Image (tube, rainbow, N blue to C red):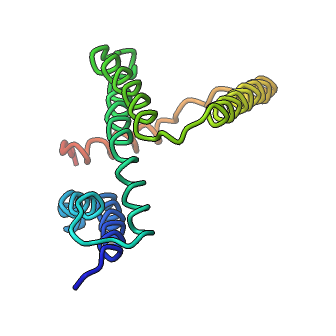
Amino acid sequence: MIEGSVQIWLGFFLILLGTFWGRMGPAFLRNRYYAPILILGLFCLVIDIYELDEQGSILRNAINDFLPWFSVGFLGYYLVLIGAPTYWKTRFPQLISGWLIIFISFYLYVKYNNHISISDVFISFTSIIGILISLIFFMFLVRFVENRIPPEDPAPELTDSEKEFVRRIISKNIGVDEE
């Protein structure tokens, strides 16, 4: 008989395995199996099949409190990344709905994690301020260093033999070999 803690560890292992197999390129045949393995791992973490001991129950409750707001937040971040400006084209429906979903995930975080106190919020806020100050200093430092580097001279024009070499390579690659 399988204990509940083994089910949880199996779920973690399957999630990692599915993630690693999903990162493989299409040349590997294992690539197509990542989604079912990842979903099976998530089900092992969420569904109660076996009785858990006290520590397993604490872990299961933490996972069940984590998944609602994380899943909604992940969807929101995905939509924001899809809607973000790319080549000066912004997809406003995805962008706006993504930000709304992210705010909903913040609400779910507060709802499912009732152990949050004012001091936790204050510590998080001061951490965010510190991160922003660090990013601003980093941007100024990068700008300072880049402005101090002298511009390089333009590259010299290709010689006739280099132009012919490039033309032959391109002709060969597109199938218009003239030889």
Q: Is residue 86 left or right of residue 136?
A: left
User: Does residue 65 lie above or below 149 as drawn?
Assistant: below
Which of the two residues, 146 or 126, is positioned nearer the viewer here? 126
User: Quadrant location of residue 171?
Assistant: top left
User: Quadrant location of residue 142?
Assistant: top right
Q: Position of residue 75 (x, y in %)?
A: 31, 35
User: Does residue 61 lie above or below 138 as drawn?
Assistant: below
Q: Is residue 157 left or right of residue 174?
A: right
Which of the two residues, 87 or 121, is positioned nearer the viewer here? 121
Would residue 117 be visible to someone looking at this image?
yes
Q: Total label count? A: 0
Residue under the image location 31 percent in, 42 percent down: 170
Which of the two residues, 24 or 179, is positioned nearer the viewer here? 24
User: Does residue 15 lie above or below 138 as drawn?
Assistant: below
Q: Position of residue 11 (x, y in %)?
A: 31, 67
- Residue at the farthest front position: 54
Q: Position of residue 107 (x, y in %)?
A: 41, 28
Q: Position of residue 160 (x, y in %)?
A: 47, 36
Residue under the image location 27 percent in, 63 percent down: 41
